[in-house]
Amino acid sequence: MDKEDKKKINSYLSFKLGEEIFALHVSKVQKILEMTEITEVPRSPSYMKGVINLRGNVLPVIDMRVKFGMAPTEWTKTTCILVVESEVKDEKVKVGLLVDAVQAVQKINDEDILPPPSIGSKFRSEFISGMTRVNEKFFMILDIDLVISTDDLVNIQAIKEAREEAETENKQNEE
């Protein structure tokens, strides 16, 4: 296999939301975390579940089911948080995505990725960069940079600032 062939092979991490299977390019996924306690942030959008502490940094967590108009995620032993890095308006943003279950890393050739459906999809097709079939199941390939929108970036900044203010206030009260 020459260099050109290797460039055509892409790896995607597949995960479930309800009965649907989605996939993200592995270059966007930083890590997979087991479920942990999520601190709610008042007045945030319904899909913004809250924040977690990731090695001393505030990480906003988005409930992907709510973001896609589904019922909120019910925590099970397979529920986890995908830490992804998105680029919104030339700014890199780390966000946690709450998903029902991680499935596998799949190698998918570009020619096996079909364009997203133009009608009939119950999910917002602007988030979907393509569809592919693996083992008789269709996967929806997400463009995480579109999922995490400019509005989300504003909300994420507000959440981080509110959380940092609360932590500063707590420290001052303790002194």
Image (cartoon, grey):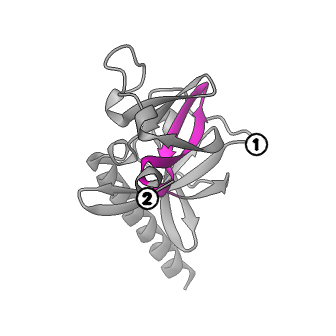
In the image, residue 114 lies at what x, y percent? 40, 28
Residue 117 vertical placement versus 105 (above, below)? above
Q: Within the magenta stretch, is there residue 152?
A: no
Q: Is residue 168 visible?
A: yes
Among the 4 quarters of the image, the one containing residue 32: bottom right
Residue 163 vertical placement versus 153 (above, below)? below
The label nearer to you, 2 versus 1, is 2
- Tell me what residue is drawn at x 56 percent, y 51 percent: 82
- The quadrant of the image that shows the C terminus is bottom right
In the image, residue 136 lies at what x, y percent? 61, 22
The residue carrying mark 2 is 3
In the image, residue 122 lies at what x, y percent? 42, 19
- Tell me what residue is drawn at x 41 percent, y 40 percent: 110
Residue range of the region highlighted in magenta in the rendering: 7-29
In the image, residue 170 lies at what x, y percent? 52, 73
Q: Within the magenta stretch, is there residue 28?
A: yes
What is the spatial separation of the Cα atoms under label 2 and label 1, in whole angstroms?
Answer: 40 Å
Task: Using the image as rendered, state which of residue 21 and residue 115 is in the foreground.
Answer: 115
Which structural element holds mark 1?
A: loop
Among the 4 quarters of the image, the one containing residue 154: bottom left
Residue 124 vertical placement versus 52 (above, below)? above
Query: Which numbered tag is attached to residue 169?
Result: none
- The type of residue carrying mark 2 is Lys
Magenta region, main secondary structure: strand
Determine crowd level at label 2: few under 14, some 14-19, many 20+ residues with C-alpha closer than 10 A: few
- In primary-sequence order, the first of circles 2 and 1 is 2
Task: Using the image as rendered, state which of residue 119 and residue 59 is in the foreground.
Answer: 119
The residue carrying mark 1 is 77
Residue at the top extreme, as displayed: 120
